[in-house]
Each structure stands twice: as structure tokens, then as C-alpha cells.
Amino acid sequence: MWRLVFTVVVSGSLLAAACGGDSDKPSPAAGTSSPAASATAKPPTDEKDLRSHEAELRDAATAWQKSLFTAGAVKTYSYFADDFKDKCPLDDFVGVVALVKVFLGDVKDDDIEVEITGIRYEGGKAFVDSTGTINGDELSPDDDDEEYPEYWVRQDGDWKVTTDDPHPCDTAGAFGGDSSSDEKTPAATGPGTSRADAVAIGTAVRAGDAEVTVLTVDLDAEDVAAEESSFPSTPEPGNRFVLARVRVKAVGAGDDTIDVGQNNFSMTGSANVVYEAYGENTSCGYSVADQLDAKLFPGGTAEGAVCFQVPRSDRGLILIFEPQFSFNNKDRRYLALQ
């Protein structure tokens, strides 16, 4: 499913991969099995019972499809069934959402219109077909059948979305990579390659074609943010703004450029929650002046601010950097803020 999301993002047909496709297409026959057919979220449920919750399904499917492109990873992840989460841990999903935002930029909920065009119930599953627009541009469904279409199931009294795709968060196939192998990319080792070995403030660490350094940190930056912004915002009760000034240097070769900005960063701490730059209640809103945003040739350097809203109770904060088009965790780097 996610490989198709990126294929469609690149080609410009955005919602085709997020939606079920053309309602005239046959869905997988009940009782047939895919390579991962055993990984369904729930045993088959009576179709009559499923239909009695159709209004809830329409609301959930619409909200999920919008959240794919507008919300933070944690919120979008909450729509998935447990079996999807088993195949795609949250850490991997954060990278997927970051890549979507690289392509789309800052998409607002009002920019997207979704229309549910049909629902089919088969074998305890609900297949939802839909069409949509982004900023008024019509997005037509992909004409190719999906090998692993997503579907909805009832789980703990709610509708949850999942897929039989054994590698739902593998994005390599969308860019011509080999996504069929079960082999894992060898884990990176060395300073900054794990939370337990996060590099200290002032220490540069390489991540792909970028070299990243945290220069300074303000662990309670509400006053600073307000002073530097024409549109000051305040954190939610119990939260604080954490603002880090960072330096990024392009260290690749030739004329390949890299884009660096707030989307490349996230934050975590002792609570083991990932805070995203543009997530709900994790963003600093418009309060960041001198925000990092640059395109660099090799040898180029940019400095700027990245800001996150985090609970005051969370300690041991760590900044996470992931390069553009990072398809696995190999180039992810961790930089200590405390």
C-alpha cells in the first residue's frame, strides 16, 4: 500500500494509492489468500453487522485519507489495525510520513476533498472506494489493480484499516528499488546511530549526504518564539516549546543537491513518543523565526531553527534527523539535547 502511495505522489495522482481504486474492479475473492493472508486483523465478521456500522466506516475512511497527507504520523498511525502495526512499527511509519511531506509540503485539511463512492463487504472485510481533490485538482484512481488493496475491519469496536501486504511501509518499490526481498538493511553503528548513543551538542554527525550539528538548545522557548514571530502561538497546557538551532552541511559529490528543513527532523525523549514538526499538538505553529529551510550543493552550509512542542514531563530529549528520500533507518541520526 505505501509503495503505491509514493508511486502516485511522484506521478501526481495523489489519492489513488490512498483510496481503494475504481469501484468496478473486483476485489480479492473471499477465501483466497495472499502471501500474508494469515495476518488479518480480526476473524471474519457477519456482513449484516458490518453494514450496521457503515456510517462510522464512511467517517473513518474519509478522516484517514485526509490524515495521510495532512496529519502527523502518530495520528495517522492510530487508524491502522494491530496486524498492520506488527508489520510496520511506528519508527518506520514516521519515515514514510516524512517522505510524503517532502513531496507535498504543508497540506491543510481544508485543501483535500474526499468522496466515498462505494463500499464492498467480503469475508469480514470492507473495501472502500473513493475519489478526491487537492486544492481543486481532481485526482483520478489508478487503473492498475493493486496486489494488496487496503481494507477495513472491526477491531475493539472501531473501524481500522490494514492490508495483506507483507511490507506495507517499504517505500523502495515506488522509486524502482527492489522491495521484494525480506532481507533487512544492516543496522548502522557508531556515534549517533541509536538513541542510546546520541551525539552531544556541538558534535557533527553524518547522515547520508548531510552533516548535522546541534549548535544551541532552548528547552523552554515560548518567550523566544513569541519575540521572534509576527504570529506568536503558545504551547498547549502542560507542554513547552523546545527550539534547537542546527547547522547542516551538504557532503555529497558532484552537483547533487539536498533539501533540508524542519521536515527532516523530529524529537523524542524518555516517554518514547515521537514528536513531529507539523503534528497535532507537537508543532510550534508560526512561532519559529529563522526556521531551517535550504537547498544545498555539496560544500554548502545552512543554519536555522527547528522547534517542537513537547510535554514538560518528558526528559532526556533527543533530536532525530532523517535525510530526504531515506527509505530505511540506516541514515537516521540522533542528537542529544540534554
Image (cartoon, grey):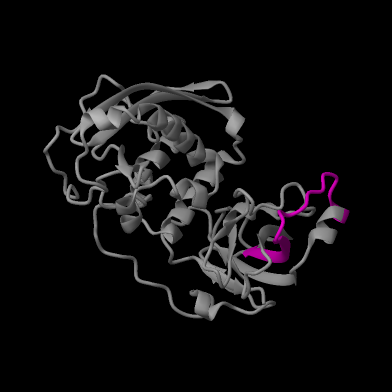
Instruction: Return the x and y of residue 213 as percentages of the image width and height.
Output: 66, 71
Q: Is residue 124 left or right of residue 291?
A: left
Taking the magenta stretch, the answer to whether it contains residue 229 is yes
Horizontal arrangement in the rendering, residue 307 relative to residue 36 (left or right): right
**Which residue is pictured at 40% across the width and 39% down the height?**
5
At 62% from the left edge and 56% from the top edge, which residue is drawn?
A: 297
* Residue 98 versus residue 211 in the image, above or below: above
- Along the horizontal axis of the image, is 9 left or right of 151? right
Residue 156 vs 190, above or below: the answer is above
Residue drawn where x is 38% and y is 32% of the image: 57
Residue 337 sits in quarter:
bottom right
Residue in the foreground of this view, choosing between 300 and 310: 310
Q: Is residue 226 above or below residue 273?
A: above
Residue 11 visible in rendering:
no
The x, y position of residue 221, in whole percent, is: 78, 63
| The magenta segment | 227-249
- Report whether residue 107 is seen: yes
Quadrant location of the N terminus in the rendered image: top left
Q: Quadrant of the C terminus?
A: bottom right
Looking at the picture, does residue 282 appear above or below residue 153? below
Q: For residue 284: magenta? A: no
Q: Residue reaching furthest left?
A: 31
The picture places residue 266, in percent across and down from the top left corner, at: 58, 60
* Tag count: 0
